[in-house]
């Protein structure tokens, strides 16, 4: 009685197997695993890893360094850091290898390849939308 199973339903259609006690693709997935898969599919992994440098900055470089320096930008593996003073900028340049090693240990190798240290931002003497070339108000001092 092979024809009794139903001729219309026997056109290559297989019965769906149950997943059983082992892990399967059909099992519910954690939100973190789904987010990681979506990020990998869309090419966001590098940006998300770079964002961890900013989020974990005090843990990566230490509280003392984090109080006197902050990350500004991360482009093409180069992290730009702004120091609170010129003395701290010099200190960061001397500690560059240790800082890169700490960052690599915290977020992964290859995320930050170079460190660019900037000193504190100087005050701007420009006021208003127009500017005349030259020394400006400093030429009237002493």
Image (cartoon, rainbow, N blue to C red):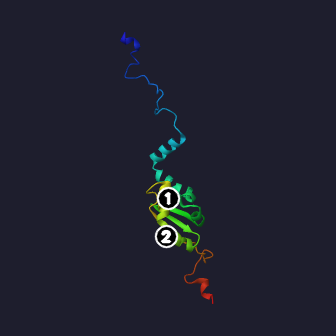
Disc 2 + disc 1, Cβ < 8 Å: no
On the rendered structure, is 140 left or right of 102? right
What is the distance, in whole Å, between disc 2 and disc 1 at their CAs?
16 Å
- What is the secondary structure assignment of the residue under circle 2? helix
On the rendered structure, is 4 left or right of 64? left
Q: At which x and y percent is residue 119?
A: 55, 72
Q: Where does label 1 land, which residue?
A: 103
Q: At which x and y percent is residue 32?
A: 53, 43
Image quadrant occupied by the C terminus: bottom right
Q: Quadrant of residue 84?
A: bottom right
Name the residue rendered at 36%, 12% in the picture: 2
Q: From this view, report whether residue 111 is shown above or below residue 6.
A: below
Q: Where does label 2 land, which residue?
A: 94
Q: From this view, report whether residue 10 is shown above or below residue 76.
A: above
- What is the secondary structure assignment of the residue under circle 1? helix
Instruction: Work out whether residue 136 or residue 96 is closer to the camera in this orientation and state it.
Output: 96
Name the residue rendered at 55%, 56% in the picture: 56
Instruction: Work out whether residue 119 or residue 105 is closer to the camera in this orientation and state it.
Output: 105
Q: From this view, report whether residue 96 is shown above or below residue 111.
A: below
Image quadrant occupied by the N terminus: top left
On the rendered structure, is 67 left or right of 2? right
Mark 2 neighbour density, 10 Å: few (under 14) some (14–19) many (20 or more): few
Q: At which x and y percent is residue 71?
A: 54, 63
Q: At which x and y percent is residue 30?
A: 53, 39
């Amino acid at each position: 009685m092979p024809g009794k199973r139903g001729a219309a339903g026997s056109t290559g259609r297989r019965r769906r197997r149950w997943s059983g006690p082992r892990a399967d693709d059909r099992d519910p997935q954690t939100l973190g695993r789904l987010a990681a898969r979506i990020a990998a599919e869309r090419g966001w992994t590098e940006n998300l890893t770079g964002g961890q440098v900013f989020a974990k900055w005090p843990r990566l470089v230490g509280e003392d360094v984090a109080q006197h320096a902050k990350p500004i930008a991360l482009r093409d593996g180069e992290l730009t850091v702004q120091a609170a003073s010129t003395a701290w900028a010099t200190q960061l340049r001397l500690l560059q290898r240790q800082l890169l090693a700490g960052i690599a240990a915290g977020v992964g190798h290859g995320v930050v390849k170079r460190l660019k240290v900037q000193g504190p931002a100087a005050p701007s003497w420009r006021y208003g939308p127009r500017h005349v070339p030259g020394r400006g108000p400093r030429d009237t001092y002493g």
